[in-house]
Image (cartoon, helix red, strand yellow):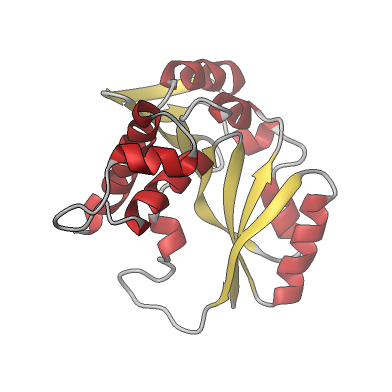
Amino acid sequence: MYEVLFRVYGDGAYEAATDGTGTRIELWCNDHSDLLHVSGGEVGNVIEQVRNTVGIGERLENGDEQVLVTEECLKAQLDNNVERFLANEGCLLVPPLKYASGGKLVRALGLSPDALARVYQSLAGQFDVTVESKREISSVTPDAPLLTVDAMLPDLSPRQREVFLMAYEQGYYELPRETTTAAVAEQVGVERRTAEDHLRRAEKKLAEALVEYL
């Protein structure tokens, strides 16, 4: 069995709602409705998009996080939903779909790499798509059959990733620290306060993603 992580950019409602907003959506489809976890950024805009697209049946709110149960299933509203591309090649979607930065992350399973390659070709015919990772699955465990680092890690913006990696490489997280945020900012070509903002946002995303595994 093989697994591929696709990043697909389209013009759907959820892609548009997360484009440039810092908002993230995780979607579990239950055929008759969807379960959504919405966090970060401009959550209000996402709520409005969801309400206008599929309706909201139930809603739980906790700070800048929302859990929504929709009235209808999103894939029923789309002729070119990703599930159709996967089903055409006998492949499976591993939920959730993750929307961020104007695109969605799609984890797909296939019995052969050729089947997943055909999925990529079909998707690329209609969308801007990249392959983020791929691997062969040779064994599973009962507690985490398909858990990967990619599935655990949050979606950092390109600048957040750049600033965080630069800080790490320059020794910002050493004890004692071997650099400052001002030096990191100079390395990446931004103002100190901008670098500090990117760094805090990256740290918050990483902490929120990893804390449940500690």
Task: Identify the residue shown where x is 42% and y is 22%.
Answer: 43
Name the quadrant containing residue 19: top right
Name the quadrant containing residue 174: bottom left
- Along the horizontal axis of the image, is 172 left or right of 82? left
Q: Is residue 155 visible?
A: no
Q: Percent from the top left, x then y, of residue 156?
A: 45, 44
- Along the horizontal axis of the image, is 22 left or right of 111? left
Counting every numbered tag in the picture gives 0
Of residues 149 and 158, the one drawn nearer to the viewer in this rendering: 158
Of residues 155 and 142, the one drawn nearer to the viewer in this rendering: 155
Q: Is residue 154 visible?
A: yes
Q: Percent from the top left, x then y, of residue 75?
A: 64, 38
Q: Percent from the top left, x then y, of residue 62?
A: 25, 26
Of residues 33 and 6, the one drawn nearer to the viewer in this rendering: 6
Task: Identify the residue shown where x is 68% and y is 40%.
Answer: 9
- Along the horizontal axis of the image, is 136 left or right of 80? left
- Along the horizontal axis of the image, is 130 left or right of 176? right
Task: Identify the residue shown where x is 38% and y is 24%.
Answer: 58
Q: Is residue 23 above or below residue 30?
A: above
Q: Percent from the top left, x then y, of residue 201?
A: 35, 36
Q: Residue furthest bottom?
A: 138
Quadrant in which the C terminus is drawn: bottom left
Task: Identify the residue shown where x is 47% and y is 47%.
Answer: 162
Quadrant in which the N terminus is drawn: bottom right
Q: Is residue 183 above or below residue 95?
A: above
Q: Residue furthest right?
A: 125
Of residues 24 and 57, the one drawn nearer to the viewer in this rendering: 24
Q: Is residue 51 above or below residue 40?
A: above
